């Protein structure tokens, strides 16, 4: 059983990011390839441009989205801006690109993505608190070797970004309904960077 859990979590971690670094910007959500399976053969979209007029194609073969696991249906670019004609995206963590807003990419907000995901804290100093308040001294301990925190709610307050999470005290990533669970709040981002790793397949 332990080997199975490690394998599952390794898969989740492997698709957490397309790159190893923090993205330059977090944007407003994601531009998701309508058919990500087109890129299982390591190819990349040909309809990515360097200008908003969509006349100059990106001159590089190194194009990776933030979530990159096309054989599992994951091909998500961070979206910086959504217009009727185009979606402004982040490529390779730091480069700006533009794609046509023509149905080949689906826009989803951060909230939509997170509410169907689990997360892991990047830094355990990001404490699990009883309430979404930095001043709340009542914290919750998670002693699991591998962290899988299911997102159940979101809240933005005074420029702070919080998510409500639950986790099984027996550390099972897929706990039974009868399993004891704890609930708390953590910050998932600040103004510039992510504070969690997102596990879309958990």
Image: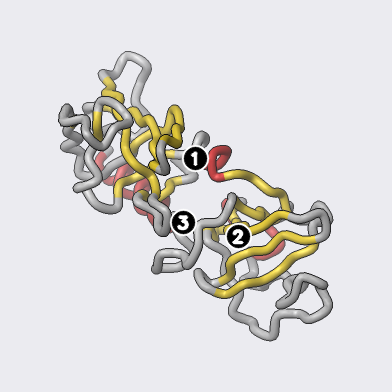
Residue 2 percent across, percent down from the top left:
25, 41
Q: Dot 3: what SS?
A: loop
Q: Residue furthest bottom?
A: 59
Label whose residue precedes the other's in the sequence (1 or 2): 2
Residue 145 placed where, x, y %? 20, 44
Q: Which residue is mark 3?
A: 15
Colour pattern: secondary structure
Sequence-first tag of 2 and 3:
3
Q: CA distance from mark 1 to mark 2?
A: 15 Å
- Describe the element under mark 1 as helix, strand or loop: helix
Vertical placement of residue 63 versus 163, above or below? below
Across and down, in percent, residue 114 comes to 49, 40
Q: Which mark is residue 114?
A: 1
Q: Quadrant of residue 132?
A: top left
User: From the viewer's perspective, is 112 left or right of 188?
Assistant: right
Q: Are marks 2 and 3 in contact (CB under 8 Å)?
A: no
Marks 3/1: CA distance? 15 Å
Q: Residues within 10 Å of mark 2 (few under 14, many from 20)?
A: many
Question: Residue, x 71% and y 77% (percent of image)?
Answer: 50
Q: Which mark is residue 179?
A: none
Q: Quadrant of residue 97?
A: bottom right
Q: Report crowding for label 1: few under 14, some 14 to 19, many 20 or more residues within 10 A (C-alpha).
A: many
Q: Which residue is mark 2?
A: 77
- Name the image quarter holding the C terminus: top left
Relative to 126, 71 lies left or right: right
Q: Secondary structure at mark 2?
A: strand
């Amino acid at each position: 059983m332990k080997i199975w859990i490690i394998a599952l979590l390794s898969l989740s971690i492997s698709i957490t990011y397309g790159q190893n670094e923090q993205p330059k910007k977090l944007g407003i959500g994601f531009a998701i390839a309508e058919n990500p399976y087109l890129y299982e053969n390591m190819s990349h979209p040909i309809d990515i441009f360097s200008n908003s007029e969509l006349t100059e194609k990106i001159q590089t073969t190194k194009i990776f989205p933030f979530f990159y696991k096309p054989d599992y249906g994951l091909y998500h670019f961070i979206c910086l801006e959504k217009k009727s004609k185009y979606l402004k995206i982040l490529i390779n963590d730091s480069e700006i690109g533009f794609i046509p807003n023509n149905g080949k990419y689906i826009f989803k907000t951060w909230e939509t993505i997170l509410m169907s995901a689990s997360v892991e804290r990047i830094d355990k100093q990001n404490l699990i608190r009883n309430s979404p308040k930095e001043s709340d001294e009542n914290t919750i301990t998670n002693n699991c070797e591998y962290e899988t925190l299911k997102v159940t709610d979101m809240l933005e307050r005074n420029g702070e970004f919080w998510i409500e999470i639950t986790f099984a005290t027996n550390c099972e990533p897929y706990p039974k309904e009868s399993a004891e669970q704890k609930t708390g709040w953590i910050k998932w981002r600040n103004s510039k960077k992510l504070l969690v790793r997102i596990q879309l397949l958990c």
